[in-house]
Amino acid sequence: MLVDFPGFGESAEPPVPWTVGDYAAEVCSLADSLGATEFALVGHSFGGRVALETAAELPERVRALALVDAAGLKPRRKPSYFLRVAVHKISKRLGGRGLKGSADYRALSPVMKGTFIKVVNYDQTPLLRRVKCPTAVFWGRDDRDTPLYMAKRFLRGIKNSSLFLLDGGHFAYLTDRTFLPVLAAFLRGTV
């Protein structure tokens, strides 16, 4: 089953800014409504954040986890990032509006801006050791949104995890023909 999270795709926005935990609770609520007491999760990018949260918080329910170019780990930052943050904060203190943020961020509604801030500033590294189920980590070799070093951090942090490299970038799962057969074999092996 494919899920459009609240505020994404065709789904209505949540009533207030949500956290990753709120999205994980929504996944469990959907599973409950379907009568699924145990399930496997496959999450790409932001969906990987939600899948990781669910697997760490409810290990008795998640029998297998596939993280696909997943977000959720604190990225390495270049000095230019910290300079931009300092300029933004100084501008705000001086009564200015601060820096505008990315075009994607500026296009969001106020509720989704609040959600974005809560999600992006949440480092899930401490959750990795709490994931108990078999975990497949699929990663595009050329991913620039969630670079390959993040896949290696997932592997170090999650016991019983394996890495599968895909040809391509952040959306390599769409074009690399090995993704679906390997994912299917992984999921069959966890039943």
Image (cartoon, rainbow, N blue to C red):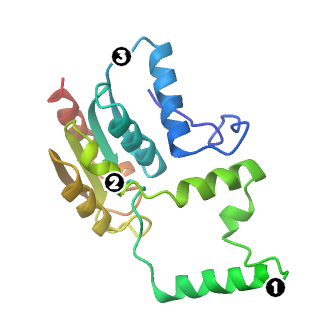
Quick one: label 1 or label 2, which is nearer the N terminus?
1
Residue assigned mark 3: 37
Disc 1 to disc 2, C-alpha distance: 36 Å
Residue at 33%, 37% in the rendered image: 55
Task: Look at the picture and state if 3 lies above or below 67.
Answer: above
Task: Look at the picture and state if 165 lies above or below 93.
Answer: above
Label 2 secondary element: helix
Select label 3 or label 1 by which is in front. 1
What x and y, as percent, mark residue 150? 32, 64
In the rendered structure, find residue 159 and report the number of the disc placed on it: none
Q: Quadrant of the N terminus?
A: top left
**The quarter of the displayed image where residue 136 is located:** top left
Left or right of 162: which side holds 89? right
Residue assigned mark 1: 94
Instruction: Say whether marks 3 and 1 touch (CB < 8 Å).
Output: no
Residue at 35%, 16% in the rendered image: 37
Residue assigned mark 2: 126
Residue at 83%, 81% in the rendered image: 96
Left or right of 120: which side holds 116? right
Label 1 secondary element: loop
Label 3 secondary element: loop
**The quarter of the displayed image where residue 71 is located:** bottom left
Which amino acid is tagged 1? Leu
What x and y, as percent, mark residue 181? 22, 38
Q: Nearer the viewer, residue 133 or 104?
A: 133
Quick one: label 3 or label 1, which is nearer the N terminus?
3
Disc 3 to disc 1, C-alpha distance: 53 Å
Neighbourhood count class around disc 1 (C-alpha, 10 Å): few under 14, some 14–19, many 20 upward: few
